[in-house]
Image (cartoon, helix red, strand yellow):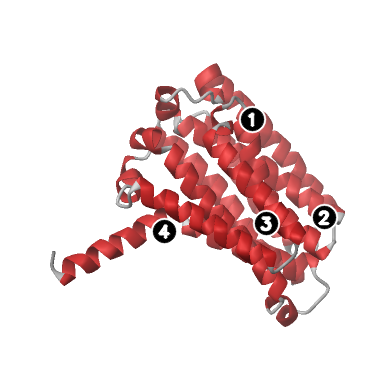
Amino acid sequence: MSSTDKKKSTLFKFLSIFSVVRIYNVLLIILAQYLTSIFILSDKNFIEVIFDFNLFLLILCSSISIASGYIINNFYDEKKDIINKPIKYKIDDVVKSSTKINFYFILNFIVVIFASFISIRAIIFFVIYIFFLWLYSHKLKRTLLIGNLFYSILTITPFFAILLYFKNIDLIIVAYALFLFFILLLKDLTKDLKNLAGDFTQNYQTIPVVFGESFTRVLITLITLINIILIFNLFLNFSSGYMYLYYGFSFLMLIVFIFRLYRSKNVSDYLKLHNILRLIIATGVFSIILLAI
């Protein structure tokens, strides 16, 4: 193999690893944690929060844990991803499964080392978190409804880590967390509709597999209505700065989501629904800045 081919091979492997760990999601969560710390949780100024070494380690441990969670999830989902995500599977498959598992253990070891610089409680927290990420990927995500609930819980868990760090649990935090939880639940149920073929083939007991698409649409509609109620609660009780702009945007997106839901019939349609929810989440991260305006 020529040096050029070796460089290309190495580059493809790096791109594959970035795809497996979903680096864009990890970076978004890092940004969300820092913005939440700066504009909601901390009484310190911007510079002090940015250079808070323990907070940096806490967010670093969270992001590495999440990345390792994506790796183990990718490992267990390999067979259904061949059906549900053929293009992504080809990218992810550039790196051998054994290499992914080794990388998974290395990342978890790094998390424990970094957590030890914070406190023994941080070590316990992240060891438990890593365990449940593995349990979710290995077992829970195949279990009816439990998988959806644990997906939402595990996604918002890193934010509880910084809540405990700042010892600042306010009603506004609870309100935002509740809204995010139901948006994530909605996103996961929509993903189950999109992945119905692969889930059915691999005997994943998701709601669309067990109860069918029609029932899942009704359930998704009910959860969407819960989210709309939560948006009104946020607008009426927690409308600091220009956050009402985000609430209005989320409301409109959810209305569009419901209308498109009953017109969706194939993977492409469900992917568009899934992307609407991803847009609401991503916009929500950046909208935290609106609290300070």
The C terminus, quarter of image:
bottom right
* Residue at disc 2, secondary structure: helix
Is residue 104 left or right of 147 when viewed as pictured?
Answer: left
Would residue 170 be visible to someone looking at this image?
A: yes
- Sequence-wise, the earlier of marks 2 and 4 is 4
How far apart marks 3 and 2 lie (CA) works out to: 15 Å
Q: According to the image, label 1 marks what residue? A: 146
Residue 264 image point, x, y percent? 46, 31
Q: According to the image, label 3 marks what residue? A: 246
Residue 279 image point, x, y percent? 55, 52
Vertical relation: 217 (above or below) 271: above
* Residue at disc 4, secondary structure: helix
How far apart marks 1 and 2 lie (CA) works out to: 27 Å
Tell me if mark 4 has few (under 14), some (14-19) or many (20+) residues whose alpha carbon lies within 10 angstroms of its own: some
- Sequence-wise, the earlier of marks 4 and 1 is 4
| Label 1 close to label 3 by CB (< 8 Å) | no
Residue sitting at the far left: 2
Q: Nearer the viewer, mark 2 or mark 4?
A: 4
